[in-house]
Amino acid sequence: MYISTTLHVINHKNNFMNLQNNNKTYLIAFPKKFHATIVKNQINIDSKIYFTNRTYINVKDDVNYGLIPYDVPKIKNDILIDDNAFLHISKSLEYNTNFIIDKYDLSDILLYPFTKNIGIVLPMDIQKDDNHEFIFDALVVEPIFDTELFSKNLKI
């Protein structure tokens, strides 16, 4: 699976497009600008966003700490990913024209689950695009909720 090094995040008045699920927050970052653009043009702030088809893989033992760009303590909690999720985004007849698309480096976004306790969702391919919703195949990285790692990022 190829993922672009540039991700595209839909933004509305400094609020990033996100999903709240089971008391967890997930940032939605599109690898393909085309996908971000078509979604941006057919949603509003009340659009429903949710997951289906969730299955997790624990990759904690696969982390190569030598590749992490700064001093990170060994992660104690599980690192869960899901490469089979479906991301549903409802469309709206009343489009919001105040959305913009911001660009971010993949390497920055991939640190969010570790440093900000925010999961990430990468919508990869459109499985369904009808009058009511988009359904994307999505890669999901769960928030880590490692207190030591999170608090280290807060220190100045």
Image (cartoon, grey):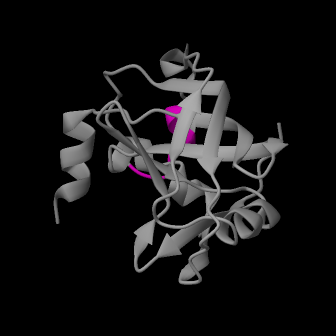
Q: Which of the 4 quarters of the picture holds residue 94?
A: bottom right
Residue 65 pos. (x, y %): 49, 34
Query: Residue 138 location in percent, x, y?
Result: 68, 37
Q: Is residue 68 magenta?
A: yes
Q: Position of residue 152 (x, y in %)?
A: 22, 49
Q: Is 127 displayed left or right of 115 in the figure? A: right
Tell me the quarter of the image containing the C terminus. bottom left
- Compared to residue 58, the image places residue 99 above or below, namely below
Figure disc tally: 0
Is 130 placed above or below 21 here?
A: below
Query: Relative to the observer, which residue lies in front, 75 or 123?
Result: 123
- Name the residue at 63% across, 41% down: 88
Q: Residue furthest bottom?
A: 98
Foreground: 34 or 59?
34
Please give the name of the residue rendered at 77% of the width and 52% of the height, measured from the top-left corner: 131
* Whether residue 3 is situated above or below residue 127 in the rendered picture: below
Q: Which residues are magenta?
A: 64-70
Q: Position of residue 79 (x, y in %)?
A: 46, 25
Q: Which quarter of the figure is the N terminus placed in? A: top right
Residue 42 belongs to the span the image colors magenta: no
Residue at x-position 76% and y-position 66%: 38
Q: Is residue 42 shown left or right of residue 113?
A: right
Q: Residue at x 69, y 46 (%)?
A: 123
Q: Seen in the image, is 51 located left or right of residue 33? A: left
Image position of 57 with respect to 127: above or below: above
